[in-house]
Image: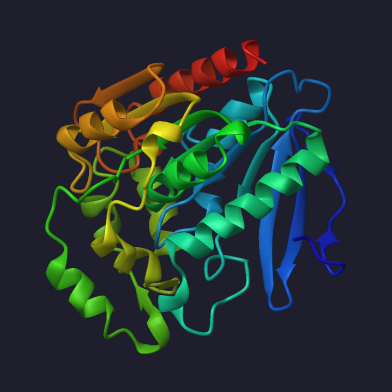
Amino acid sequence: MQLEKTRRGPEFHQDSGYSVRETLLRIEPRVDLYIREKWRAGEESKLPVVLLHGAGMDSTGFDVPVGNTSLVDALALNGSRTFVFDFRGHGRSSRAEDGGSVTVASSVADTLEVLDFVREVTGSEKVVLIGESYGTIVAPVVAEQKPERIAGLALLGLIHSGSATPLDDFLAELREAPSGYAFTTEEEWPEVFIPSASPEVVAWHQAQFGTAYAYPVGPYLEVAKLPHTRAPERIAGRVLVITGDQDPYASEADTSGFLAAVGTRQTQHIHQNGVGHLPYVEKQALEVQKALCELIDACSAQQ
């Protein structure tokens, strides 16, 4: 529930034609969610889009300012008002005292609050929901709990019922992290997450989420409890999954199982060659942008 101490910033109109606004949405006495809207004024002809980031990251990753990989720019140019936000414990949202307390349940609750905020801002009951990595675990739970609110679901680097790479040793290490927070070294980024990204995109991610970035371990520990979807047959909107063959976490078998279980037959899976876990910033990013815009167009046309 939005509380009185919510703080909305002014609208900024950029020379590039985009408009931006930041909000701290107070949803609990000690929890603020950082939300950033980006759109092109007067060109909002499509459904709004809400994007859910991965673990060890935050929402800034959807607006990478190099290499034509700003996903929010592409979606706003296509006619959507975009909403990115940081889950509690991440980025500019409130820090959790214990990083292990950040769970799929808390992230679903955060997302539902943001959906209500989007409805207040745009008047739209429905949105297109895009998740990447940890966001692909959260987004389907939101879609099955509130199918009437989700016109379309896009999942980038899907993790559904398990990880393609065993994570037991990694998760055991994270359980020992002080106060439930850990760090990713700069050197790990290219090898693990974005093997086909350009050098400038890799450098941006290393600077943004490298050694100095502390992240809550709770979302990673939730992988041990997969799957978190309990009634995938309730997912009724269009579904798009995009994965890469170099992704250490997503697998074709997992994707096929998920798509067979959802309640809609309007599904599509794009499997990219030579691409890792974050296809929206890698070498076929423009193909990803095109597929997402087509999904949004189709969902918007049905409203």
Corner quadrant of residue 214: bottom left
Q: Nearest the camera: 111 or 146? A: 146
Q: Position of residue 72 (x, y in %)?
A: 59, 36
Q: Can you say which quadrant of the picture contains the N terminus?
A: bottom right
Q: Residue furthest bottom?
A: 178
The residue shown at (66%, 62%) is 33
Residue 245 seen from this side: no
Tell whether 130 sits left or right of 169: right
Q: Is residue 75 left or right of residue 200?
A: right
Q: Quick check: can you spot residue 178?
A: yes
User: Which percent across, then down, holds residue 119?
Assistant: 76, 39
Q: Is residue 229 above or below residue 154?
A: below
Location of the C terminus (image quadrant): top right
Q: Residue at x 34, y 26 (%)?
A: 284
Instruction: Name the quadrant containing residue 160.
Output: top left
Q: Position of residue 15 (x, y in %)?
A: 78, 34
Q: How is the image coloured?
A: rainbow
Instruction: Give percent across and percent down for residue 60.
Output: 55, 52
User: How many labels sit on residues?
Assistant: 0
Q: Identify the residue at horizontal 20%, vertical 50% (top origin).
A: 162
Residue 211 in which image quadrant? bottom left
In the image, residue 7 sits, relative to residue 174, either above or below, namely above
- Residue at position x 40%, y 59% in the image: 55
